[in-house]
Image (cartoon, rainbow, N blue to C red):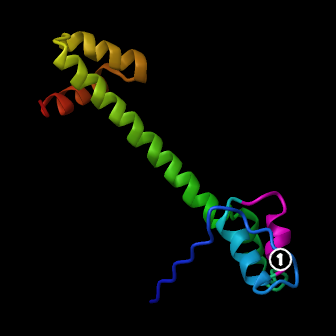
Amino acid sequence: MTLVVIKLGNIVYNGEKGEENYDLLHFLNTVMYPHKADFIKTVSEYIDFSETEELWKEASEVTGLGQCVYNDGKMEGREEGREEGIRVLVLDGIAEHVSRECIIGKLQKYFKLTQEKAEHYYDAFASEM
């Protein structure tokens, strides 16, 4: 197995047909960045889906590699940020000598947690003190 890493840069490629490496850069830009509504049309310039119905079905459901990475990272980042917020609330509350019950109540209120889940987070982060 060989791994190839390609960095396209921070901006979307907007080259013109006829420019050096246009086809390669245009194709990579299409599959790596979150795509627009014309994704299938653009990819069809490079891949012939007409011979294989199964490939056509896959292509119609694809969201583009860039979109997948973006979505996964976004969700993962949100969850990490949420958990860090919970941790800070617990540790700050303990440092300020706020009661366990009050901190658990705030966790339920601000993070929409059940009593059980709030207690779990409290116990997990309180052990860091």
> What's the residue at 86%, 70% (across, down)?
41
* Residue 56 as seen in the image, left or right of residue 113: right
Magenta stretch in the rendered image: 35-45
* Residue 109 as seen in the image, left or right of residue 125: right
Mark 1, residues whose alpha carbon is within 10 Å: few (<14), some, or many (≥20)?
A: some
Figure check: 117 above or below 63: above
> What's the residue at 52%, 54% (across, down)?
72
Question: Which residue was labeled with disc 1?
Answer: 44
Amino acid on which disc 1 is placed:
Ser
Provide residue 82's location: percent of width, then percent of height: 40, 34
Quadrant showing the N terminus: bottom left
The image quarter in which residue 45 lies: bottom right
Provide residue 52's location: percent of width, then percent of height: 78, 83
Q: Is mark 1 on a helix, strand or loop?
A: helix
> What's the residue at 87%, 85% (across, down)?
18
Magenta residue check for 36: yes
